[in-house]
Amino acid sequence: MEHLWTVLLLFLLAVFLFLYNISTAFHYYSRISFFYLTVLLHGMEVCITMIPSWLTGKGADYVFHSFYYWCKWSGIHTTVYGYELTQVDGPAVVICNHQVMRSNDNLLEARTIPLSLLKA
């Protein structure tokens, strides 16, 4: 029975790799699905790792920096402009504009631009 599961898993992996290389639609949907899984796992991770940052009053700076490394596999590059606006003492709400653009080398780039900062 163990060998049956191994053969089935290898077969499914081979089918996945075949479809990933042949079908552009499958390539797109699998890549987007893994990207959303990355966003979900990153959100779960920062719920725990942000506790020391909030206790020291640094705010959400770790979220911006860690998401860059979580998305490195996907070819999506994240850039934060106006980062100095997020460096405030005490609690605040950051209103951001998220933009996705395609660069010349056919890679996606996600830009986060803080538009305004509301201090509590």
Image: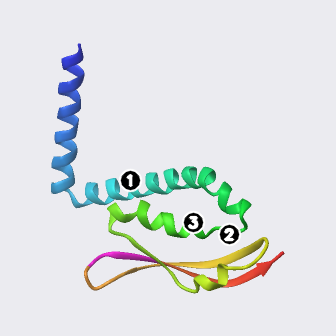
Answer with left or right where residue 11 lies relative to residue 81: left
The kind of residue tagged 1 is Phe
**The magenta stretch spans which residues?**
106-110
Q: Which residue is mark 3?
A: 62
Label 3 crowding class (10 Å Cα cut-off): few <14, some 14-19, many 20+? some
The kind of residue tagged 2 is Lys
Where residue 48 sits: x, y (%)?
62, 50
Does residue 87 show up magenta in the picture? no
Does residue 108 show up magenta in the picture? yes
Label 3 and label 1: CA atoms lie apart by 22 Å
Q: Which residue is mark 1?
A: 34
> Which residue does the image show at 73% across and 67% down from the upper left?
57
Quarter of the picture holding the C terminus: bottom right
Task: Name, please, the residue furthest toward the front.
Answer: 56
**Mark on residue 98?**
none
As drawn, 27 above or below 100: above
Task: Name, please, the residue furthest toward the top.
Answer: 1
Where residue 78 sits: x, y (%)?
44, 74
Q: Which residue is mark 2?
A: 58
Q: Nearer the viewer, mark 3 or mark 1?
A: 3
